[in-house]
Image (tube, grey):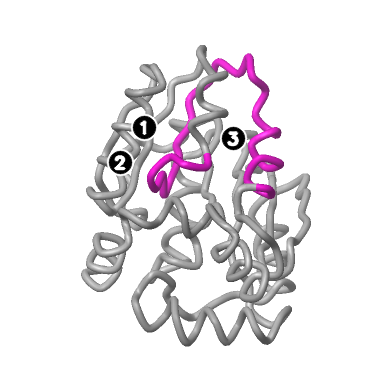
Amino acid sequence: MKKIERAYKSISKVYDKSITGDNFLLELLQKVSWGFNSHKDHSVKLLEYIPDDFSGKILDIPAGTGVLTYEKYLKLKNSHIICMDYSNEMLEIAKARFRENGISNVEFIQGDVGNIPYEEETFDIVLAMNGFHVFPDKEKAFSETRRVLKNNGYLIGCLYVKGINIITDLFVNCVHVTIGTFTPPFYTKNEIIDKLNREYKELELWNENSVICFRCKKN
């Protein structure tokens, strides 16, 4: 976890631009390495699963800098949102972003997905975008996110899977794994489908190149 903490501390100030493809060169890098121009496109589609009038409790983990969620959270005025991340630096950026946009129904907590400090069946939705490929103990992360999710609550998220695009796999292993922003081992598409089908129901799933996007309901 220390390697991950150091990695996200070092990239926190450039994270937003890198994930959204802020300019032509970054868009080109995203297109070559990931096969799409921006991670924001499929994130917007995922967030559409949450109705704007939703009034339940959401755990956003890892919350990151909020660059992919703040526009949606502006609409979720009746929701109670917990933003949790291991990186204080990322959370501080999210806090500033939400404050500047007048988003006040959000709490922030620094913590480890392997030990989520909430009781069983606390949340109506667990939102886990771009997280599971980072977590060192992925089985524990899945176990904990499921534990705090209410029965018939939804797990919504996306993650990198190996074996779909050789260029993306090379980029992930040569860049992300090296600097510590991704942590092996990684799932294949079939492995993540099998896992979600075993632990959840009503799975909806699609992929944007090597990123699997999903929504499923806790049994």
**Residue 75's x, y, as percent?**
57, 19
The residue carrying mark 1 is: 97
Q: Name which of mark 3 and mark 2 comes first in the sequence.
A: 2
In this picture, residue 199 sits left or right of residue 20? right
Q: Residues within 10 Å of mark 3 (few under 14, many from 20)?
A: some
x 78%, y 45%: residue: 202
x 68%, y 86%: residue: 166
Q: Nearer the viewer, residue 72 or 33?
A: 33
Q: Look at the numbered discs 2 and 1 and tell me whether their residues touch, using CB distance below 8 Å.
A: yes
Identify residue type, mark 2: Ile
On the image, which quarter does residue 213 sit in? bottom right
The residue carrying mark 2 is: 93
The magenta stretch is: 41-68
Instruction: Establish if 48 lies above or below 111.
Output: above
Distance from label 2 to label 1 (Cα)? 6 Å
Identify residue type, mark 1: Arg
Residue 108 on the magenta segment: no
x 29%, y 32%: residue: 96
SS for callout 1 = helix
SS for callout 2 = helix
Task: Indicate which label's residue lies in the foreground, 3 or 2.
Answer: 2
- Most common SS among magenta residues: loop
Q: Name which of mark 3 and mark 1 comes first in the sequence.
A: 1
The residue carrying mark 3 is: 151
Instruction: Establish if 150 lies above or below 211.
Output: above
On the image, which quarter does residue 194 sit in? bottom right
The quarter in which the N terminus is drawn is bottom left
Distance from label 3 to label 2 (Cα)? 33 Å
